Image: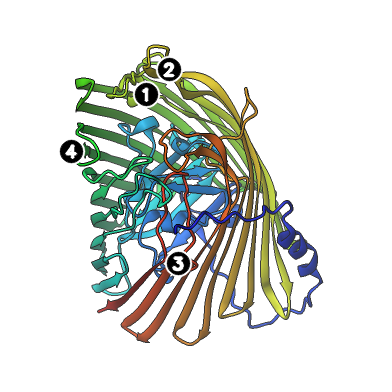
Amino acid sequence: MHKRPTVFPQPRFPLPFLAAAFLLPALPATAAADDASPVEEIVVTATRTPTPIDRIPASVSVIDREEIRRNAWQTLPDALRTLPGAALTRSGGPGGNSSLFLRGTNSDHVLVLLDGLPVNDPAMTAGAFNFGDDLLEGVSRIEVVRGPASTLYGSNAIGGVINMITRAGGPTAATAEVDAAAGTDKTWRGSAGLYGTLDNLDYGVSVQGFTTDGDNATPSRMAGNLGEDDGFDALTATGKAVVRLENGRLEALLRWRRAESDLDNVPQDEPNSTGESDHLAWQLAGERLFFGGALNSRLSVGQSRYDRTYRNDPDSVSADYSRDTYDSVRTQADWQNNLTLPATAAVKDGVLGFGASFVRDEVDFDTRSVSAYGPYTSAVDADADSLALYVHAQARLFDAVDVTAGLRNEHPDDFGTTTTWRLGAVVPLPSLATRLKAAAGSAFKAPTLYDRFGTNNYGYRGNPDLDPEKSVGWEAGFETDLPGAGRSNLATLSVTWFQSDIDDLITYRYNPDFTSTVVNVNEAHTKGVETILTLRPADWAELTASWTWTDARNEQTDARLLRRPEHALAFTAALEPVAGLTVAPEVSFIGRRRDYIYPDGSGYGAEGTAGGYWLANLSLTWQAREDLQLYARGSNLFDRTIEDPNGFAQPDRGILVGLRATY
């Protein structure tokens, strides 16, 4: 007897956070003199200039290497799942196509970077990024900026930017790291890395493998469930070198990943349906200081190359055959300059950034199929160029307000120019231990080559006359540090309101002759609140709770946009109750959301409401010796039956046990 998805009542008011906001200031305000002072967090992605996070007028989350290890995360979706303002859907288990919605915008409105190099796939539908394939070894930190960021990075950055920063350097000339783990569903993972510093060279080399038989992505309630597990295999290799020079530095990056997945399609298991994806990214960069260090000039060039193949051979379910290949190359050359401005009585810490960026996209599609309707073949070979000029400035005014401003002009070779802007300010209130933040800006997403020229055997034909999607958004909020219980840093509370209007959304149109295309017709409006509360009741305990309310709607119909939950809660913690033992629980709630709802025996869905669900994970790490850690991770501990999106079952309860050794 199969389990039905459990539906929980929806929270109508953010009661835990309202209570915290009123009660925490009433706690004893005596500060302990020996409280550990927090280390100032420096972020690059939000301004393209190293800047303390509390002086950035944007909502930024940072996931560092320590957090990745503490939670024993295996894939990129594991690390992003509990972020405020983020909604993640995955078509099955590890390796399933994964989409991330930031602040209610589309999944293709998120720009993904690797050390600043754009890695969205121009051959993917709408130029989105598949988060499901990537592993985390070789990644030092992940910086997530929510809100419009096109003035810094161009197309796709309507909802935000995710920058994966790779590892290089270490405390010694050479540090070797080995990680091996095994778990349920015949899951195995292993990695090896060498990181170090030798004279003026910082380097990092790593390889990671992951394999699992997985669970069945077709829900047990579906008549087409054949009990077939959907496996996933991935291999990633990363190399990075940084040479520090007297007046600059040289960098080289190479990252390669291969992923192979078993695929299902609602409502039927597909025993012979598979997907393969190869991704190669490389970048070379040089920095040089001029005018006594006042000007830092950086020139980089790099490529992101995808080779994806989807194949479905005849089997007991269907005699049809299909093989689709999607190859793409995105080449970028970027010239960035940061000029430190002279300090005056009114203006300090001033930096003027300016530069130019050139991007060339090339795609090659090949579709072949044989079915009861006969054979079908199509091929597309297309390319597009874009040149952009940008300027960005930041400074502290009158020792009281941090301000930023940016402007970018994008000039594609095949449709009109687009200009984007952004303004922001941070106002510190030291007497209240509070920072007020506000920002506004515009962003855009250019139609991809697949949108314009793509074809498939289901009758889709691209539209070469598409216009870019454009948005204007703003956010405002505060962050305050709350003393109490004898601690000066007992809690930090932040609340941010965000809103965005998106015009000329690209959407599918189905024609009377059973073909389909994409057109600019829709407009969307998104708004919401992100609330984050971090508690530090002791040196060995840090607890974080976040609540996000999102209202994302189609402006014409007032209908909620699909797969954006109205309410999302996340509770995480980093606890060390005894020396050497780290406990990291993760509990999240995803509320009601619009989705395509598929009946038990049919692949023909209709829009409806999917119920909410809870997900609980737990990781334990034991520092057995200075050079040896033992760890375990339990996922979906209460073995909930979850479909997100509807029609695709998420993994059952799973356990992973492993060890890490450092030499």
SS category of the residue bearing label 3: helix
In percent of the image, x 52 and y 39: which residue is there?
Answer: 595
Choose top left, top right, bottom left or bottom right for residue 282: top left
Type of amino acid under label 4: Asp
In percent of the image, x 44 and y 85: which residue is there?
Answer: 580
Residue contact at pointers 2 and 1, CB within 8 angstroms: yes
Type of amino acid under label 2: Leu
Q: Is residue 210 visible?
A: yes
In the image, residue 256 sits, relative to residue 518, either above or below, namely below
Residue contact at pointers 4 and 3, CB within 8 angstroms: no
Calculate the distance from the C-alpha at mark 4 to the C-alpha at mark 3.
Answer: 42 Å
SS category of the residue bearing label 4: loop
For the residue pair 311 and 209, the one nearer the viewer reads as 311
Q: In the image, residue 592 lies at what x, y percent?
A: 60, 47
Dot 4 alpha-carbon crowd within 10 angstroms: few under 14, some 14 to 19, many 20 or more: some
SS category of the residue bearing label 1: helix
What residue would you read off at disc 3? 67
Label 3 or label 2, whichever comes before in sequence order: 3
Residue contact at pointers 3 and 1, CB within 8 angstroms: no
